[in-house]
Amino acid sequence: MKRAIPAVISAATALTLVLAGCGGGDEPVDPNAPVTITLAGWSLSSTPEFKTLADGFKATHPNVTVELKEYAAGNDYDTQMITDLAAGTAPDVYVMKTLKNFYTYQSGNQLLDVSDVTSGLGSVPALASYQVDGKAYAVPYRQDSWVLFYNKDLFAKAKVAPPDGSWTWDDYTDAAKRLHTGLKGAGSNATGAYQHTFQSTVQGFALAQTPNADLLSGDFGYLKPYYERSLDLQATGAQPTFGTAKTNKLTYQAQFGKQQSAMLLMGTWYVATLLNQRQSGDADKFQWGIAPAPQFDKSTTGTSATPVTFGDPTGLGINPKISKSKVAAAKEFLKYVAGPDAGKALAGIGITPAQATDAVTATLFGLDGVPQDDLSKFAYAKHTTKPENPVSKHTAGLQNLLNETHSAILSDSKGVDAELSKAQSRAKNEVLNQ
Amino acid sequence: MSRNTVAGWSFILPNFLGFAALTLLPVVVLFYVAFTNWNVFGVAEWTGTANFRRMWDDASFWTALRNTVYYAVFHIPLTLAAALGLALLLNRKLRGVRFFRTVAFFPYITSIVAIAVVWNQLFSPEYGPINALLGAVGVDDPPGWTASSTWSMPAVIIVGTWRYMGYYMLLFLAGLQTIPAQLYEAAETDGASPWQRFVHVTLPGLRTTTFFVTVLLTIESFKVFDLILVMTGGGPGQSTLVLSQYIYQKGFEENQFGYASAVSIVLFAICFGITVIQFWVNKRRNS
């Protein structure tokens, strides 16, 4: 009989899950009645942005409570959310954690049309990423952009001039090599640069900056010079090899935070991480700064120009199964999260909001430990940010195969040309023809 | 219906309901989904054999299949030999034999993530102790292991063998206990050498166990997933991409559940086919 117990429990659990999916029903609409909307988030204890948004909204809308529902972090977030949406148990408002999966939600009719919300938001560049056939299906609340973090102390130690906003990729490569030599001469083991194992560190910049580069064309020739420079940096020892980073599970946080590398290309979210890690002792205390990401050519360098970089927005959308009485509150919440008040609240915890304003920059640079130089402020506030994952049916498939190409090229390359040509033929035969 | 039948059903039913809801039904649904185009949301669109035709022209599917076979072809005999060797070694009356048996079994119960982290560091091409050792014995150009597309699969096979040999060793140990000691005594009296005793007494005595172990090992090898996912993620490139990971990628990362189901059916057919052949060969041998 003992063996039957787990089975009964399993069956009961399954039944509960099925019944949970059948609940609900429309409640009567009353604009003044207390409303509770549920919001999905991940790692709630270490990711304060969801609570910040919920509390900030409650301050101006006392009758609306935003209840947080915790989901898995990392890639599992989407798997779990898709399952819950399919089962009808997802929260009222949920996060588009990556732009790559927006297509799945939108084409699967899992997002309410929120065009009426976005029409009142003014100019938020990332809005375009969530528009399909002229209608908006989500609003952005975060917009990180990739910049260059650098360690001023290590630059001084190596006697190399720090970035001044005029760097192209050749300047960056050259500086990384000179840093490597200089640091070695000064008795330091730190490398000149650290490009983490993410495909973004090479492909994101190449796609955003190269004129006429188009991920969905299946023509990946634009990646070539970017890979050649990365391989050059690895070969000269100016940055750890891909194999070393993978096999030793190097983290970019430790690599830069513990002064193992003088430069780090990373998204603006790293500002908050670095500040927290300095407080907890996981990162050293040293002089650091932010510079614009190195550019494709001189035309977008200098503080009078606008540097081009990449970064996907993080957005919020409404589950179409939300009860009608909550739709108005949910839309109000979306209006709030993409607006200036939420922007300032997010900047106050080191997060880069979707709407970049002077007030946002002032708030972020008012935080203790953030560099105060003009170049850092310029790099943080001014750039053209292009999406890394242009919304399309084919994006997930193309990015998966490009991720494989990335590891193939950076490990023991059979040659950049050979790998890119293989990627192009795979894109044509396995993804774009589907 | 007799009282016995009712009693029998009442014992089976609770368990069967769980099995039906959590295993049987998903499997039946899988066979249906394999013939559709379905992204989880909405209705699955019937596409007939389109998914299977697509597989035929899908280079990544063939790469994953080749890699799976590569893993199985080396992992099965290596694990079999290592497990049997360990079992023979630890079937004697040694001091501390229980300790050694536990040590040999330990990798099997260790967290796969911990295994991946530690082995990846051991395999590190520049800083790992394995290459340091190879360098010390005069190997000038040591392998790149998990950082090289040529060596990543051998690296995974080594770890796979290390991880599973303890488990199969236990099965072999159990099998060895069933061989009557008199057979060895008789062989020894007749002047048989240790090798002859192994070939003519141990191996025939272990035939049922070997068959059972081979079947389990074959199925386990063809559906290898977690070890490769945490060790190499299928890379570098597609050098360690195996079928089960390809299914995961197409299903859960690209939301092509129809195609992923079709590939699952192929994986099922391979495992089923090989198992049937093994049973058939075993039956012929026994008769």
Image (tube, rainbow, N blue to C red):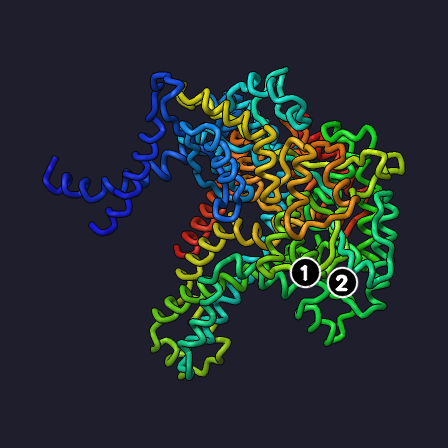
Q: Secondary structure at mark 1?
A: loop
Type of amino acid at the residue the image marks with label 1: Lys
The residue singled out by tag 2 in the image is A190
Asked if residue B220 shows in the view, the reply is yes
Which of the chains bears the disc numbered 2?
A: A
Q: Nearer the viewer, residue A348 or A7?
A: A348
Residue at 39% from the left image edge and 29% from the top image edge: A36
Look at 45% across and 53% down and name the residue there. Answer: B215
> Which one is closest to the eye, mark 1 or mark 2?
1
- The spot of residue B17 in percent (x, y) is 28, 38
The residue to which callout 1 is attached is A285
Q: Which mark is residue A207?
A: none
Q: Is residue B237 above or below residue B54?
A: below
Q: Judge by depth and name the residue closer to the eye, A63 or A265.
A: A63
Q: Is residue B259 visible?
A: no
Expressed as whole percent of the image width and height from the top left, the position of residue A316 reads 54, 30
The x, y position of residue A292, in whole percent, is 78, 42
Task: Measure the alpha-carbon separation of dots 1 and 2.
Answer: 16 Å
Question: Could you say where residue A162 lies in the image, as x and y percent from the top left?
Answer: 84, 52
Which callout, 1 or 2, points at the residue further toward the start of the chain? 2
Mark 1 nearby-residue class (10 Å; few <14, some 14–19, many ≥20)? some
Q: Determine the secondary structure under disc 2.
A: loop
Point 65% across, 58% down: residue: A254
Q: Chain of mark 1?
A: A
| Amino acid at the residue labelled 2 | Ala
Q: Residues within 10 Å of mark 2 (few under 14, many from 20)?
A: many
Q: Seen in the image, is B167 located left or right of residue A360?
A: left
